[in-house]
Image (cartoon, rainbow, N blue to C red):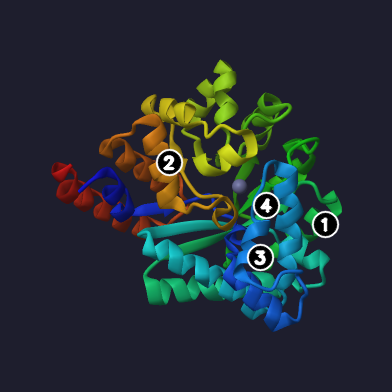
Amino acid sequence: MDLAAFTAALPKCELHLHLEGTLEPELKLELARRNGVDIGQRTVEEVRATYAFDSLASFLAVYYPAMDVLVTRRDFHDLAMAYFRKAASQNVLHAEVFFDPQVHVARGVPFADVVGGYHDAVLQAQRELGLSAALILCIVRDMPVESAEAVIEAVMGFREEVVGIGLDSDERGNPPARFAHLFARARAAGFKLTAHCDVDQEDSTEHLRQVLEDIRVDRIDHGTNVVDDPRLLQLLRERGTGLTCCPISNSFVTDDSKAPVIAQLLRSGVRVTVNSDDPAYFGGYVTENLIALTRQAGLGPDELIQLQRNAIEISWADEEVRERFLGELDAYEALAAPDL
Ligand SMILES: [Zn+2]
């Protein structure tokens, strides 16, 4: 078994995946037809041609308008279910997935239809695929704070369906501190907390400081710029705070996958993980991200196993899921590794 085959069959835990970023061209066309939404393209090839980006701005200009094809509870279910099937095919056993309700509510979609549709798929994935999944509501940081306040208010009625609160979208000029009151409220209500600290942003270090010291998140999405500040790196280590890294999307946003930094953090015992972010747009699900990192940083099988151990440790899965996952990982290590 070569390293690519070993990676493909490895039991995996996905922690950084935007459901809206899994909208493949085929499903986008189908939903557009179903809902009578004119998206300007008629074939899969035409849609795929729009999924080509050279900057964060060009990505966001396609990403948000694409969501117009999501209208009914069934649409949200179908999007999430297509992703869960893909994830199961890559041997993802546990997935904690983001969604951006502000964008949908602003288009007139009821909050309950968004959460309800996604949750229907979570239940179906558990039942039909044996995949455990949990939903994380992301605050869209470049939309008005009032719209974030409205969805945080709304999610208080969905404590069973949503496990945590995150923060995503364009970081420039949108510091985490602006949303500290919402994170405090969510924490008090029992939600777990995470936040994007994207790579190489203006004020990256200050934003990392805010999420670690002031908001005290449970984990950080991306966050590799923590290596720029020894004090914050030390704090991250002391707390055991994990990072959810996404090598392929990094290379779209910054021309740099950050593979050496991710590998350096992994080898120094920081709980880094590898994930897929917006795979329909960036052309790689979790297996492809792991293979990209392996090729660029020269990871070995032990390190691929450690990445999955890190992921389940920093996940918000319950004890039973955690134990089952670690059992499968141990069995895989014992069976597969000696053949390399
Ligand atoms: Zn992300």
Asked whether residue 185 is in view, the answer is no
Find the distance from the CA under tag 2 to the CA under tag 4: 35 Å
**Who comes first in sequence, dot 1 or dot 4?**
1
Tell me what residue is drawn at x 32 percent, y 53 percent.
Answer: 8
Query: Where in the figure is residue 85, as x and y percent of width and height?
Result: 44, 69
As drawn, is 65 to the left or to the right of 335?
right
As drawn, is 323 to the left or to the right of 211?
left
Q: Which residue is mark 2?
A: 292
For the C terminus, the quadrant is: top left
Q: Which residue is mark 4?
A: 186
**Which numbered circle lies on residue 46?**
3
In the image, residue 337 sits, relative to residue 113, either above or below, namely: above
Q: Residues within 10 Å of mark 1 (few under 14, many from 20)?
A: some
- Mark 4, secondary structure of its residue: helix
Find the distance from the CA under tag 1 to the CA under tag 4: 15 Å
**Who comes first in sequence, dot 3 or dot 1?**
3
**Who comes first in sequence, dot 2 or dot 4?**
4
Q: Amino acid at mark 2?
A: Ala
Q: Which residue is mark 1?
A: 147
